[in-house]
Every structure is written in C-alpha cells, then in structure tokens.
C-alpha cells in the first residue's frame, strides 16, 4: 500500500515538473520577446516545441522509442527551463528545480517505476 502511494506520488511529481518546465519556457519567451507579436510567438512557440519534443521522444507512450532521444529531450526541456529561470533572475529556483528533477528521475529509474 505504501509502495503504491510512493509510486503515484513520484509519477505525479514527474508530471508536475514537466508542466512547470513548459510553463517556465513559455514565461521566459513572453518576458524575453520584444513587442506583442514576438512575445506571443516566442512564448507559445517554446511551449509547443517542448510539448512536441516530449510527446515524440520522452513521454511514457512516445511516438518514437529512442532512449538517447528521450534523454536528450529531457535535458533540453528541463535544462532550458533552468536556464530560463536563471536569465529571469530566479537564482534559488534555478538550483532547486534541476535538483528536484534529478532526484525525481533517480527515484523513478532506480525504483523501476514506469514513466
């Protein structure tokens, strides 16, 4: 019973971290763009690109089962979010976010949870 709750909690955390990464990328795009159209295109474009990459390579039921591409996608999306946090001046979140991501992925990988 406790093991099942632990599994659900870690998989839920993984999903929340993915959503946070996409949100941070979109927020960074909106804050970085110059002009309304550029802000909208950059914010939406980064979020859409991250979600498309994730769906193709890193999702549990990804379109393509290429382990190296899944790792590269996770590094790109989570790393991009961390870089966005840094550029936006959120230094504590820049450190805490990737630490939490790595810890969660380690628990999932070494605990053999399905993701």
Image (tube, grey):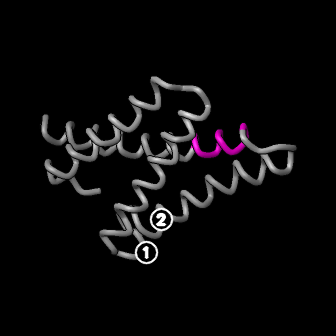
Q: Residue at x 27, y 47 (%)?
A: 105
Q: Which residues are magenta?
A: 23-31
Residue 45 higher or lower than 106, as above or below: below
Left or right, 88 with respect to 14, comes to right
Q: Residue at x 40, y 69 (%)?
A: 62
Could you say where residue 11 lies in the image, as x and y percent from the top left?
A: 31, 45
Label 2: which secondary element: helix
The image quadrant of residue 9 is top left
Quick one: label 1, few (<14), some, or many (20+) residues within 10 Å?
Answer: few
Quadrant the N terminus occupies: top left
Q: Residue at x 34, y 61 (%)?
A: 71
Quadrant the C terminus occupies: bottom left
Label 1: which secondary element: loop
Residue 27 is inside the magenta segment: yes
Q: Decide which of tag 1 and tag 2 comes sooner along the chain.
A: 2
Residue 76 higher or lower than 63, as above or below: above
Residue 102 is inside the magenta segment: no
According to the image, label 2 marks what residue?
A: 55
Could you say where residue 76 lies in the image, as x and y percent from the top left?
A: 46, 55
């Amino acid at each position: 019973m406790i093991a099942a709750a632990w599994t659900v909690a870690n998989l839920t955390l993984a999903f929340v971290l993915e959503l946070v990464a996409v949100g941070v990328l979109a927020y960074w795009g909106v804050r970085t763009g110059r002009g309304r159209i550029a802000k909208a295109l950059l914010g939406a474009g980064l979020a859409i690109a991250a979600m498309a990459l994730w769906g193709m390579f890193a999702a549990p039921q990804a379109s393509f089962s290429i382990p190296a591409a899944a790792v590269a996608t996770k590094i790109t999306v989570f790393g991009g979010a961390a870089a966005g946090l840094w550029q936006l001046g959120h230094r504590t979140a820049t450190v805490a976010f990737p630490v939490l991501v790595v810890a969660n992925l380690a628990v999932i990988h070494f605990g053999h949870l399905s993701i």
